Image: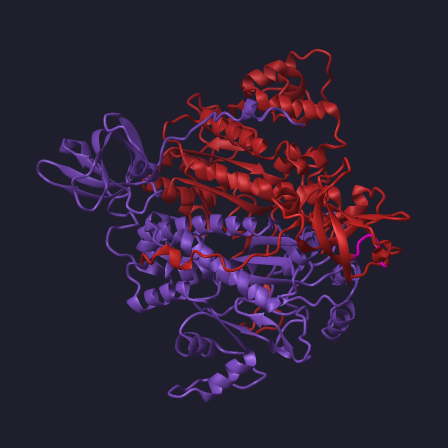
Chain colours: A red, B purple
């Protein structure tokens, strides 16, 4: 099974260069080549006309120059064209290269009267309603490219740390959080049943859409030690905030805690990975486009957070700081034993610390059964994003599962207990909404603009 | 927004090396270090004992050598341990390096009487029933690492060709094939409705699980030109074959056909990409493990297919060849206008061609509405895997949609027609089951062994 690799290494097929490559790579200025794309804007003058051509591969597209202005007949915003000509360094300030056009082929016309993506600024809400065409706008296409780049960054980072990418199931009989609104599959009309309108479960028992891959990742980590996934998750939440989607993508990782670092190890890896993603994308043109209209304070906050070491504080200290806070009135009074509210987290990060902060050691009763209790028996290691040291002690886990009414049967949580019963060992993990990561690095307010085709309560287009 | 990258480039956190790294990288033979993992096997002799320690990062794990045999007290297969010692070059034949153990810490015991993953060979069916622990076996962990490696290969390949990775929606109002069994979400009890037991749709209209990302990718391609995804897809199929899962992952790509190459361009990219993935993984230890028990003929077939250029033939020629075939009896008689059966494809590839073959130019009526009809009006470009030139002509598409009863309303296919109405252009795409790719390169018979936690009719564990 070791054929000489050279026999099939040769590249057989190359797609023609995208505009991004034409803008970036060495070009023969005398070669005639064809560029496909759609017209973003067009400016007709007496002796020369200009158009911006985009194929979505590059934030600026490329400027097309028409010395024969009749070539632009029939070209309107949105028209798909094939332009043939030569690539030249641009004498203009705004772009590096331009295409001197010899010939135009119209591939698909576009009625300027009804085209939904007009040149003027379109509201976010309007673009959400025209979701099928919004990838043609500057901001949405920059977000999509950023997302793709981040996906590569995430995979490179975890690969370097010895993790394997895994695909955890979407359909499951479990509910990792032991609570919360989950989507459920409808039953099917069953041809094998005699009575009419009788329905049955396709899998023989109820199937839900996953809310988190954590428990499945723990099973895979019992074999592979370090695993992660970027997987769709689903919550049937009716809240209409700018941080919630019914369908979202979650980056989740699970690994054996070789050196028993506990939450401090999670903090280390999370901070390191986020800074690594940031260094991959910041300074790039897509991030420039996205941050163009974002206020200076937010920009400064991101920059600062990337240069310093991130703070870590316990929940107890956080509550104390909140209670001692001057010049601020909270809607919810901070109190030991209660969940930290968004307003509390915001104050801690923005005012008290002035940067990102990990909050650790939460009260045990606020958190799910799978989190390992600290030796004090009252708190569990935790931080934002949702992370924890997993409970690996069989007896403690079983008693907590019993208390939570989680059964140990075949279609219940017996398998999860087995992971401890047979050679379990200390392990940790975290989950992070991928859209929130895109929002953070892209300076985007609403997660609905951080995923190609968002779904939320009462809204599912396409 | 261009902070000096150096300010946050420093690596802050390193997980300790995995066994794969200890086997591969330069090691100080005098350094004492700790290795975590679980015991795969143990062999006790009078003066020295040996164990194979695995952390799932490496096909062979590492041999642990105990000169003090009392250190192995309490160690059984499946026990999780932390072994401390020195890494040495192994005098044995079977492994490169070994760990000379000074100290043992048992992290999680494992009752050898009830441990489901015994050392003897376990049947595939048995391991499916013990899905939560099967990642500890040689074959399943090799498959998981191969899957992860392939994921990297796929992303590298498409990145090189100028594609962007996108996340298409899982929940959708559409059904890309216009037919077939799809899963549907159950309705919710609606607190806003007065009557008891009244239910409603969470999104206001029915939601299905996606069967293919194609139509959504076409929308994104209208902005980004070249997009792909590796996304879960769902089919409520009751057939229990070794090629079908209810939940599977599909690699799908969609791109603008700049040079109007049509199906020949798809053939070029598919062949090139598959050979590229193969060259990334073949010769690696995981593939060696997986092919260990596969017969020589199959191995030879894969090797041959990687060295030659793949055949391309039209559906018409294929049917003629099938009709002229000697020394073979087909269950289904080959006939122009009928679907090619598996037995036909198998004969064409294995006997007639002796390697992979693309079949193009299928009869139009066998194929979905979105495929572009050839100029003869009777055939559509197509090949295996499922691929086609998309119908970009607005009038042709609309008439085909009408014929198929596909509405143009807001929650129907109006948006899909819009992609042609506003600057559409020639584009092509394909879809390929990721599990089938894993099966092909891993020499695995059944797709149930090509995904971590398979789901099929009546079967959904965990």
Q: Is residue B207 above or below residue A360?
A: below
A169 or B367: nearer the viewer: B367
| Residue B195 is at least partly visible in this image | no
* Nearer to us in this view, B370 or B158: B158
B394 above or below B221? below
The extreme left residue here reads B46
Indicate yes or no whether the magenta region holds residue B184. Answer: no
How far across and how far down the image is residue B261, in percent?
62, 66
Q: Which residue lies furthest to the right in this view?
A: A46
Q: Position of residue B418 (x, y in %)?
A: 78, 60
Instruction: Determine whether, in the image, residue B30 is placed left or right of residue B231.
Output: left
Q: Give the range drawn in magenta.
A: A74-79
Measuring from the top left, give residue A376's x and y in whole percent: 44, 21
| Quadrant hosting residue B412 | bottom right
Q: Which residue is drawn at 74% across and 63% down?
A: B413
Q: Which residue lies furthest to the front in this view?
A: A30
Where, quadrant-wise, is the N terminus of chain A in this rendering? Answer: bottom left
Main SS class of the magenta portion in the image? loop
Is A3 placed left or right of A82 in the picture? left
Q: Is residue A325 left or right of residue B78?
A: right
């Amino acid at each position: 099974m070791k054929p000489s690799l050279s026999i099939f290494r040769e590249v057989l097929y190359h797609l023609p260069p995208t505009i991004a490559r034409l803008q970036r790579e060495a070009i023969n200025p005398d070669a005639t080549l064809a560029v496909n794309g759609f017209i973003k804007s067009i400016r007709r003058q007496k002796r020369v006309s200009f158009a911006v051509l985009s194929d979505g591969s590059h934030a600026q597209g490329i400027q097309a120059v028409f010395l024969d202005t009749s070539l632009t007949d029939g070209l309107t915003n949105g028209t798909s064209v094939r332009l043939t000509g030569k690539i030249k360094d641009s004498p203009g300030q705004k772009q590096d290269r331009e295409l001197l056009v010899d010939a135009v082929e119209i591939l698909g016309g576009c009625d300027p009267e009804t085209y939904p993506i007009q040149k003027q600024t379109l509201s976010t809400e309007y673009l959400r309603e025209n979701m099928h065409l919004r990838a043609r706008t500057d901001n949405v296409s920059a977000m999509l490219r950023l997302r793709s780049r981040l996906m590569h960054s995430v995979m490179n980072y975890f690969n370097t740390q010895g993790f394997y990418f895994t695909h955890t199931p979407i359909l499951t009989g479990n509910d990792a959080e032991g609570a919360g609104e989950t989507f459920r599959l409808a039953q099917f009309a069953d041809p094998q049943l005699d009575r009419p309108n009788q329905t049955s479960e396709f899998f023989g028992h109820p199937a839900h859409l996953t809310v988190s891959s954590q428990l499945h990742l723990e099973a895979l980590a019992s074999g592979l030690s370090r695993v992660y996934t970027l997987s769709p998750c689903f919550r049937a939440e009716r809240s209409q905030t700018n941080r919630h989607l019914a369908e979202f993508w979650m980056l989740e990782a699970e690994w054996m805690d070789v050196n028993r670092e506990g939450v401090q190890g999670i903090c280390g890896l999370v901070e390191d990975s986020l800074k690594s993603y940031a260094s991959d994308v910041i300074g790039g043109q897509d991030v420039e486009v996205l941050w163009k209209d974002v206020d200076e304070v937010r920009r400064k906050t991101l920059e600062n957070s990337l240069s310093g070491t991130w703070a870590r504080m316990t929940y107890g200290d956080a509550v104390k700081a909140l209670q001692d806070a001057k010049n601020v009135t909270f809607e919810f009074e901070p109190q030991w034993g209660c969940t930290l509210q968004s307003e509390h987290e915001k104050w801690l990060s923005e005012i008290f610390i002035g940067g990102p902060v990990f909050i650790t050691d939460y009260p045990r009763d606020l958190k799910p059964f799978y989190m390992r209790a600290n030796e004090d028996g009252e708190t569990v290691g935790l931080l934002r994003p949702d992370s924890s040291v997993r409970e690996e002690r069989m007896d403690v886990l079983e008693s907590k599962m019993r208390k939570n009414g989680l059964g140990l049967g075949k279609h219940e949580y017996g398998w999860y207990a087995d992971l401890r019963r047979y050679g379990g060992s200390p392990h940790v993990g975290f989950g992070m909404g991928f859209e929130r990561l895109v929002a953070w690095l892209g300076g985007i307010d609403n997660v609905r603009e951080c995923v190609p085709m968002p779904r939320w309560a009462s809204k599912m287009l396409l």
